[in-house]
Each structure stands twice: as C-alpha cells, then as structure tokens.
Image (cartoon, rainbow, N blue to C red):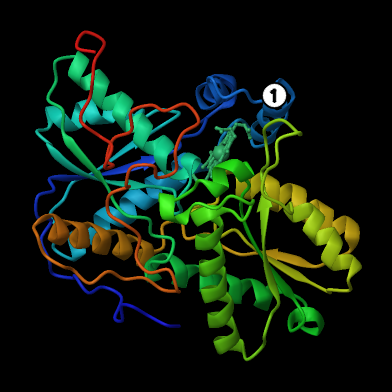
Amino acid sequence: MPEQCDPPLSTAGGTPGPYDALLLLSFGGPEGPDDVVPFLENVTRGRGIPRERLKEVGQHYFLFGGVSPINAQNRELLDALRKDFAENGLDLPVYWGNRNWAPYLVDTLREMVRDGRRRIAVLATSAYASYSGCRQYRENLADALATLQADGLPVPQVDKLRHYFNHPGFVRPMVDGVLASLAELPTDVRDRAHIAFTTHSIPTAAADTSGTPADHTEDGEGGAYVAQHLDVARVIADAVREETGVDHPWRLVYQSRSGAPHIPWLEPDICDHLEEVHRAGVPAVVMAPIGFVSDHMEVKYDLDTEATAKAAELGLPVARSATVGADPRFAAAVRDLVLERAAAEQGGAPARCALGALGPSHDLCPIGCCPARMPRPAAAGADWTGPVTEAQG
Ligand SMILES: CC1=C(CCC(=O)O)c2cc3nc(cc4[nH]c(cc5[nH]c(cc1n2)c(C)c5CCC(=O)O)c(CCC(=O)O)c4C)C(CCC(=O)O)=C3C
Ligand SMILES: [Fe+2]
C-alpha cells in the first residue's frame, strides 16, 4: 500500500497537549422495543422523512428485539480505547455521548465540565465527510454547548478530530475483513468474486456539496463523500490484490436509502447491484461496508438480512466483510489522531498518517464545508464563534 505513514503511529509517546478528555460522539440507538419509536422521532425531527419509511425502519429494529447493536459496539470501542491509552501511557479520560439516544451528548458534556474538562477532543463514529456524517455532528455539539451556556455551566472547547477514512488503523482492518470474506466463499468461485464496497446512500445534492468548497461538484459526481469512499475502496482492492495475487473487480455501491422517491440519492443500491452482476455472470460477491465504523443496524439489516436474502434468491454466494468496530488497530489510530492534533494545536507539524491519493483531511472544517440546507450553528469548525443563547441572541 502506498503510505504516508509507516510504521503507522508516528506520534507514539506524545502527550495529549491541551486536551483533558476525549469524547466518543456517536449516533445512539434503541436498547429495547419501547425505545424504538422515540429514537426514530429523535433521529428524524424536522427532516421530512416519509412515514412509510419510518414504519419500515421501525420494523428493522423490532426484528432485532428493538435493540440496535450500535451501543454495545460503542461500549466495546470505549473499552478498547481505554485499554490502548493505558497501555501506551496516554493519560486521557474517555467519555461517550450520542446524538440520538442515551447517554445523550448534552448530558455527557455536563458531566465532563463538572469533572473539570475544558478542552475536549471529539471522535465521531463517522469516518467520511458529508452533512450527515460531519456537520450534523457539529450542529449537535453546538446545540449542546448552547444548553450548557444557558444552564450557566462552563463551555468547554471542543475539537473534532479529522476524518479518518484513510487512516491505516481504519483501512487495514477492512483489508483483513475482505480477505477473510474471500476465504469464506466457495473455492471454485473465489477468484472470480467481485467486491461491492458499500456505504450509506445520501441525496446526490448532499454528496455534491460534501467536503470543503474546493471538493464540491455540480453534476452528481458526489463531492468529497464519493471521492473519499472511492479512494479507500481502491486502497483496499489494491491491498487485496497484493495479498492474493488476484485482481477482483470492484464497485462502490450504496445502501439504506431513505427520503422521498423523487429526490435523487446516490446509486446503485446494493440489491440492484447484486442483480446486475449476477445477470452479467459474476459468480460471487464480497460486500464490504466501508462506510460504517461498526456493525450497526444498517449493516445487520440492510446487508446481512435484506441483501443477503436477495443474493440467496439469486443463488449468488455472498460474504459480508467485518467493519472496524473495536479493532485494537483502530483504537491505536484514535490515539494517533489525538496526539497528532495535540501536537498541531501546540504549533507543531506532526506527521499525519493517511493511505491513498487524497492525503490527510483538514483539522478544522472550513467555512462552507458540508453545508446544511438550513444554516444553523455548528461547533468545531471555522464558522464557529461560540454558543449563542436565546437571552443573548
Ligand atoms: C451518511 C450517514 C451515516 C454514516 C455516518 C454516521 O455514522 O453518522 C448514517 C449513520 C447512521 N444512521 C442511523 C440511523 C438512521 N439514519 C436515518 C436517516 C438518514 N441517515 C442518513 C445518512 C447517514 N446515516 C441520511 C441522509 C438519512 C435521511 C434523513 C436525514 O437526512 O437525516 C434514520 C431515519 C430513518 C431512515 O430514513 O432510514 C435512521 C434510523 C444509524 C444508527 C444505526 C443503528 O441504530 O444501529 C447510523 C449509525
Ligand atoms: Fe442514517
């Protein structure tokens, strides 16, 4: 693999610099049947998602006892981070807060400031640029900070760590996952298997405006969101070829589309793609969900249930590769990102690990990065000037 950073952890042995805590910021998910509807209400508040889609998504959760796997996975990741930090002498407490379910972000931030934390590094469980995957997290941070301010609590500085889609600690576990999935396929079709890299579909308009203004596209080409996924897919496919000596054709495809049918979203959908490659005579497919940090509901339902059923119906052997989850290499990557940012905040020029052609992403989202359709305050970017409460504003 072409590398900007080998061995992967250039900053091992550094200090957390200005940071007094790390916040793991995630999506959140229901933990039982009674949570499902209120969770979906939290997620979709003001977003105009059709009722039919919500009922359908509710069913996906009920099929799994109303429990999303995401919270358990975040607890595992927390353990992995704490273990990695302790083993490597990084003295930095790790907290966890979610955008859409308990423990809620605002409650965690309250706890953090009560514990005296004032300068917080934030790791979002979303690796790529996009409104949904980046700015929305920043907007929720802004809302939570405004609540703290309104409550008369100190307002900490929050710094969102850069996108890690191309960090070796994120990419390498996915390479291993694809290799393991290839090994699961029947030997007679294995070498002719295609790889379908999957990610969350988003509206093409959101894709085209993803990333910095320089990354934006105007023609449905998908902006930074698509470019970043393609770059990671290429790195993984190249690494798999190096390892196996076989060139597996691949394509970036999408899953979990929602929204109104007349609004264009990124395509093709994984299920349509499986049909298409099957028709073309492809004998097996590895589905590699590179767009997701862990095996949450989109992976468990849309891939492991729906797409896997579609493949069975077609008689097409498929294997779904592992997400990164709590892989110790990912925990080490998070440590690297904290130390890298700490060094940068202290005026240094740290090495920045990144695979692929795009290079390391920015620390601070510039103005116009992944814009919202309705502009709202977003923390941890160049357009953030601090919380404004009702009373002041
Ligand atoms: C890019 C992206 C990621 C990856 C980045 C990241 O991880 O953040 C992601 C993650 C997730 N999305 C999740 C759940 C949902 N997303 C929804 C709706 C939407 N997601 C969108 C995009 C993304 N979503 C979009 C453009 C919508 C349409 C409405 C809107 O513009 O907001 C809806 C509403 C119903 C529906 O429309 O499907 C639900 C329930 C869960 C939790 C899963 C679990 O419980 O295990 C996770 C991790
Ligand atoms: Fe989503």
The correct choice, above or below, for 321 with respect to 356 in the image is above
**367 and 280: which one is in front?**
367
From the viewer's perspective, is 360 left or right of 391?
Answer: right
Q: Decide if residue 109 is on the left or right side of residue 200.
A: left
Q: Is residue 316 above or below residue 338?
A: below
Residue 321 placement (x, y as % from top left)? 61, 64
Location of the C terminus (image quadrant): top left
Q: Is residue 332 visible?
A: yes
Across and down, in percent, residue 315 comes to 89, 64
Image quadrant where one finds the N terminus? bottom left
Q: Amino acid at mark 1?
A: Pro
**Quadrant of ligand 2 in image:** top right
Locate residue 88, reporting x and y percent: 18, 66
Crowdedness near tag 1: few (<14), some (14–19) or many (≥20) residues, C-alpha within 10 Å: few
Q: Residue, x 42% and y 28% (percent of image)?
A: 375
Task: For ligand 1, tell me if the residue under mark 1 lies within 8 Å.
Answer: no
**Who is closer to the viewer here, 137 or 368?**
368
Residue ID for mark 1 = 50
Residue 142 at what x, y percent from top left? Answer: 30, 29
Describe the element under mark 1 as helix, strand or loop.
loop
Which residue is rendered at x = 45% and y = 47% of the image? 73
